[in-house]
Each structure stands twice: as structure tokens, then as C-alpha cells.
Image (tube, coloured by chain):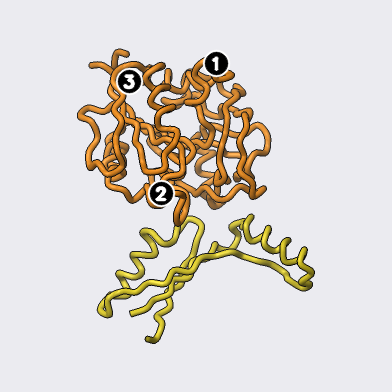
Chain colours: A orange, B yellow
Amino acid sequence: MPFTSAVITFPGSNCDRDMAVAVEEVCGGTVHRVWHGDASLPEGVDFIAVPGGFSYGDYLRSGAMAARSPIMQAVVEAAGRGVPVLGVCNGFQILTEAGLLPGALMRNAGIRFVCREVPLKVENSQSLFTQRYFKNQVITVPVAHHDGNYFADAETLDRLEGEGRVAFRYAEPVNGSQRDIAGVLNEAGNVLGMMPHPERMIEAAQGGTDGRKLFEGVLAGLNVSA
Amino acid sequence: MKVRVHVSLKNGVLDPQGRAIHHALEGLGFAGVKDVRAGRLFELDVADDTSDEALDEMCRKLLANMVIENYRIEKVAA
């Protein structure tokens, strides 16, 4: 079976095309662009990406409106079946608002929008998404967000750490996130949310290729051909 | 029926916006401001027979993020 993926677009998404290009470039197969108002995902979808942007103008809370859109019910169902789901930036916010990931993304501690490359430490190299990296490897990936300050209560944070569900940590202070958490996994390990943008580090022309291995990991974890 | 929903951050959740507002008040010369927490107010106009349970559900499902926020429902006399 060829690799079948879906990139969701909400009104206000702006990283959806970058994401689709990255998935196509690294994973090949067929990338379906899915609109937020659609009620279903492509048949036999192997991978779902929820991209960055400012869905619904960040009204109410970042990701809050998108999380209640029709397609997200289908994404939650697919995640429950074990389909890998990656949420980047606004996508991460949407996945937490949808209840697929614990915690919340709050306004950056420094109030300002942060847009720069950051060093990211790979905390867990066993997950589907991170298996092509080494544990403690430091990679460079850009961030561009206003609400990336990860918050969860201490009990939840301890559980996440204990279960190896912190996928990535900032190697320097970026936004005030609790314990410098940049990306978290769900309990089953098939849902990853992260503020940095791996889809912007696919080709040398983008300034680096550290993001490729994330998509390579997804492909390697699935028994499909590119 | 008019309903006000007050949404505020839970105790212990850091509020960068509140802190910035606090600094701004101090900058304007207002002394004695000990803390500022920013919240949100929703004014809803709902059918008179809307149940308390339904109002609660609106808050939990959308208006507030229960991970970081509390809410308080206030029914406003017409």
C-alpha cells in the first residue's frame, strides 16, 4: 500500500502547504489536503498532520475553535485507532484543546512573539516520531509562536516525564514552558504535539535538514512503501 | 435570559499578561497594586429555559479551558 497522508487546513492555517510539501518530499505517497469542515478523512489514512498558523484568528484561545471543528472528531477517532497524528505549533495547541494531549499552551512568558531557530534536545528516541534521532541529540528547528508556553500541573508533568512522553525539550529558555517542554506524546505514543516546526527544516535551502528524520521515523514505523 | 460567564486563570497558573498589566499600572504611577490577573467575560443571551447543566457544559466544552481556567456563571436580572 502506498503511503496515504492528510494535512488539515483550517481558516487561518498558514503552514499547511509547507507541511504538505515536507510530507510529500520525505514520505512520498499521496498527500491529501483536508478542509476543516469535512467530516471524514481519506480512506486508509496512514498519517495525519495538523499544521501551524492562526486558525480562526486565535479567537477565544489559540486552537480552541479549530479543536471543535467537524474534521477534528474524525482526527480524534483516527488517533484512537492508532493512526499517527502530528500537531505542529497551532496544531499542537489544537491537539491539546481537543483533549488528545495533556496540558495547555499559554502566552509566552516574555509576552513577545518568538520567531527564531532554537536548539532542541531529543528526550525520547524510542517513539515513532523520534526513532531516527539519538537520545539527547540536539537539533536545530525554528519556532514562531506567541502562545507556546507549555503548562500542566506538577502531577501531570511528573507522569509525562516518568512515561517518557516528553519528546523534545528546549536546550535554552524560549517561552517559559514548564520544564522547557517543547513537544509531548500521548499515552499510546501515536500523537505528538510540538511548538517547533520540523517541516521548515527539510532541505538545505531552508537552513538545515534536522526536521527530516521526524518524517522518516513516521514512514519507517509504518509498513508502507513510499 | 442574560448570563455572564467569568473565566479566570486557576491559582498557581502564571499569567504573563496580568504581570505586564501590573507593570504598566506601576509605570503609570499607581502605587499599591499587589497583583493583577487577566480574565475574560462572556455575556450570553440564552433561552429562558436553558438549564444550569447546559450552561455548565458550554463553559466546560468551550468557554473555559479546564486545564488552566476556572469559570463562574452569573445570571443577570433583566
Q: Is residue B74 left or right of residue B16?
A: left
Q: Secondary structure at mark 2?
A: helix
Q: Residue at x 31, y 42 (%)?
A: A36
- The mark that comes first in sequence, 3 or 1, is 1
Look at the picture and state if B40 lies above or below A166: below
Query: Which residue of the protein is positioned furthest toward the left in this rendering?
Result: A43
Q: Which mark is residue A222?
A: 3
Q: Which residue is label 1 attached to?
A: A205
- Chain ID for label 2? A
Answer whether labels 2 and 3 touch (C-beta < 8 Å).
Answer: no
Question: Which class describes the residues within 10 Å of circle 3: few (<14), some (14-19), or many (20+)?
Answer: some
Q: Secondary structure at mark 1?
A: helix
Q: Is residue A40 left or right of residue A13?
A: left
Could you tell me how far apart the alpha carbons at marks 1 and 2 are, in whole angstroms? Answer: 31 Å
| Type of the residue with mark 1 | Ala
| Type of the residue with mark 3 | Leu
Residue sitting nearer the eye, A102 or A5: A5
